Image (cartoon, helix red, strand yellow):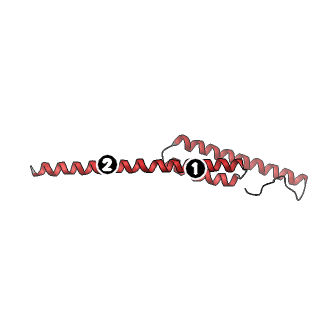
Amino acid sequence: MKAMMIYRSSIFMILVCLITASLALAQTSVPISEQAEKLLSEGDVLVQNHNLQGALDMYKQAIPLYHDANDRQQEGATLFKIGLVYYKLISRGAQDVSASRRYPGKSRRTDHSG
């Protein structure tokens, strides 16, 4: 009889621990996802404002958050955006080199933020 009570109380404690752990996981994954979405949105605004380096920083911060939230679709979409920003940076660099060859001492680049 005493062994049965110990067994039941052990099962009860295990269930309480499992429920507590699952609630904690559910509560932490929502803010992580929201934080990642905020970083992604900020990165998008920075791209529109031609601050490509700033956008890269935002996107790179969002990657581990999406990874930890197990959101592979958004993680992949963010990696794609990083690739686009690198492409734009490379294109911008090629334009800068081309402009400096035509007009020594001048660059076509108008913003110096990134």
Of the two numbered discs 2 and 1 in the rendering, the one whose residue sits closer to the viewer: 1
Q: CA distance from mark 2 to mark 1?
A: 31 Å
* Quarter of the C terminus within the rendering: bottom right
Residue in the foreground of this view, choosing between 101 and 49? 49
**What's the residue at 85%, 55% (across, down)?**
107
Q: Quick one: SS at disc 2?
A: helix
| Residue ID for mark 2 | 18
Q: Please identify the residue farthest to the top as the structure is shown.
A: 73
**What's the residue at 42%, 49% (across, down)?**
27
How far across and down, in percent of the image, does residue 71 sit? 50, 43
Q: Is residue 112 left or right of residue 40?
A: right
Q: Are marks 2 and 1 in contact (CB under 8 Å)?
A: no
How far across and down, in percent of the image, does residue 25 sit? 40, 49
| Residue ID for mark 1 | 38
**What's the residue at 26%, 50% (across, down)?**
14
Q: Earlier in the sequence, mark 2 or mark 1?
A: 2
